[in-house]
């Protein structure tokens, strides 16, 4: 059984799954629009969550949030599940799938056979969509792969119940009813932008949003002294990997958000948003510059490569620019009502 | 980033079907999707992480030869596992796994226990007891 599902690759896995899922139901939203509506831009540096023994730096909200936000704004009904029992999780998937419904799910990338082996870390927040089954083999739409791919029953079971930081626990989600769907309007976009501004500016904990970038900068200055140069370089490499992992991450997300602001500008008839989009693009370029210089530092191929202090200064500059941008954006959206 | 500046530094992704979808502005300032096979700083970060893992594995091999650590410790490290994650996949406890990372406890493992560990690590028993 194969669903008539159009697979399009995307920059970020969850956007891609949501955008592809909605298209199946005749709702055409671009990846950037999904990302924006889901208030997907974020920053968090969390020393209390560890991956490979190092602090987790994240550029996205918790997995599943983009989907929840988008369906809420469009008034689409959905269901989501998580499981303890592996066989039950697979049976629940089959039941829904065989009724003709594509199922989005959260998986770990470590055991995904079509990933290059260099990418196989215990990263457990990857989204795919299951869109068919022949005998024992599932057809899968994975947004980071250009073509559709396949996973056997055992492979899928394994990745759905991956272990490690934030285990997916067989999480799956699907759309149940679109009959009361609202068309995308100005107000929905306005609310989603406001929400993103508030998440970047107003979470009263120093590890999140713009404050989180400054927090990372502050910790980065002490790495070398506290951990030694080797461990410091590893920590930096981890930030860059998270920053750029599989096309997503810091810079990539800034560019997707800039694309969203551009689309929003046309839809809302707010030409000023195009200026914000441009500013976001240049912030994205700053993140890229940060990654580029960081790579030079831990590779030590350049005797005059920059220091951790200078890298931290770059982060502070980025934080200032993002704070300015989101403050301006928030004001614009509050006045736009 | 402009569409013609999107990096195409293939060294990791090109062998697989995985690609990066990047967003960049074209000459009219409009955002477009561009598919990329990778970017050097990112490839460097991934390679650096693996290089460190390999170096640490060499250290562990020395300790195995010295009779302190067991091959299990090597495979856990080589496969970027942790005792905790392997515990999750194998059904043993974290403390059992940690104990078996020492040579003297590892040598007492039964055939069936070795098999469970090998399956959880996705390797053969033959490989599990060696340092390959």
Image (cartoon, coloured by chain):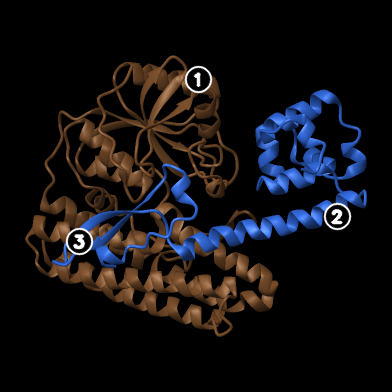
- Which chain is depicted brown? A
Marks 2 and 1 share the same chain = no
Residue furthest top as drawn: A135
> Compared with residue A124, is residue A25 higher up or lower down, i.e. above or below?
above
Please give the chain letter of the residue carrying mark 3: A
Displayed quadrant of residue A2: top left
Apparent side of residue B92 relative to residue B46 in the rendered image (left or right) = right
* Residue at disc 1, secondary structure: helix
Q: Chain of mark 2?
A: B
Residue B97 shows up from this direction: yes
- Viewer-proximal residue, B59 or A14? B59
Q: Position of residue A208 (x, y in %)?
A: 44, 64
Disc 1 crowd, CA 10 A, few/some/many (<14, 14-19, 20+): few
Residue matched to label 1:
A88
Secondary structure found at label 3: helix
Report the chain shown in blue: B
Q: Report the disc number at residue A261.
A: 3
Image quarter in which the N terminus of chain A is found? top left
Query: Which chain hosts label 1?
Result: A
- Residue located 73% across and 32% down the image: B118
In the rendered image, residue A62, in percent from the top left (x then y), is placed at: 42, 49
Residue holding disc 2: B62
């Amino acid at each position: 059984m194969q669903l008539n599902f159009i697979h399009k690759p995307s920059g970020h896995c969850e956007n891609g799954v949501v955008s592809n899922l909605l298209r199946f139901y005749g709702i055409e939203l671009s990846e950037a629009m999904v990302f924006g509506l889901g208030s997907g831009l974020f920053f968090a540096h969390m020393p209390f969550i560890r991956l490979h023994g190092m602090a987790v730096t994240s550029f996205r909200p918790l997995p599943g949030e983009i989907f929840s936000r988008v369906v809420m704004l469009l008034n689409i009904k959905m269901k989501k599940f998580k499981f303890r029992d592996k066989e039950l999780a697979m049976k629940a998937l089959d039941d829904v799938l065989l009724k003709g419904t594509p199922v989005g799910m959260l998986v770990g990338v470590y055991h995904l056979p079509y990933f290059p082996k260099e990418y196989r870390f215990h990263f457990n927040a990857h989204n795919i969509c299951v869109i068919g089954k022949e005998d024992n083999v599932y057809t899968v739409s994975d947004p980071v792969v250009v073509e559709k791919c396949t996973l056997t029953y055992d492979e899928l079971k394994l990745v759905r119940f991956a272990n490690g930081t934030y285990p997916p626990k067989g999480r799956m989600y699907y759309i149940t009813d679109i009959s009361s769907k609202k068309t995308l309007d100005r107000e929905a976009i306005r609310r989603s932008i406001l929400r993103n501004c508030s998440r970047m500016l107003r979470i009263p904990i120093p590890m999140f949003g713009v404050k989180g970038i400054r927090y990372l900068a502050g910790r980065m200055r002490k790495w070398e002294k506290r951990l030694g140069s080797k461990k410091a370089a590893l920590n930096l490499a981890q930030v860059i990997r998270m920053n750029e992992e599989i096309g997503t991450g810091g810079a990539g997300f800034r560019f997707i958000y800039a694309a969203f602001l551009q689309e929003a500008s046309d839809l809302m008839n707010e030409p000023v948003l195009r200026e914000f989009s441009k500013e976001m693009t240049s912030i994205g370029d700053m993140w890229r510059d940060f990654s580029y210089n960081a790579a030079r530092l831990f590779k030590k191929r350049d005797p005059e490569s920059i220091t951790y202090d200078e890298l931290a200064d770059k982060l502070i500059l980025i934080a200032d620019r993002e704070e300015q941008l989101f403050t301006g954006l928030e004001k614009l959206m509050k006045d736009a009502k | 980033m402009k569409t013609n500046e999107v990096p195409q530094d293939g060294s990791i992704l090109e062998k697989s079907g995985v690609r990066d979808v990047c967003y960049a502005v074209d000459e009219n300032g409009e955002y477009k999707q561009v598919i990329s096979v990778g970017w050097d700083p990112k490839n460097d970060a991934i390679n650096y992480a693996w290089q460190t893992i390999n170096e640490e594995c060499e250290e562990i091999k020395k300790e195995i030869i010295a009779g302190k650590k067991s091959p299990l410790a090597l495979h856990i490290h080589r496969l970027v596992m942790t005792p905790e994650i392997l515990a999750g996949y194998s059904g043993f406890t974290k403390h059992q796994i940690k104990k078996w990372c020492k040579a003297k406890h590892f040598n007492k493992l039964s055939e069936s226990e070795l098999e469970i560990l090998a399956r959880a690590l996705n390797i053969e028993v033959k490989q599990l007891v060696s340092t390959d």
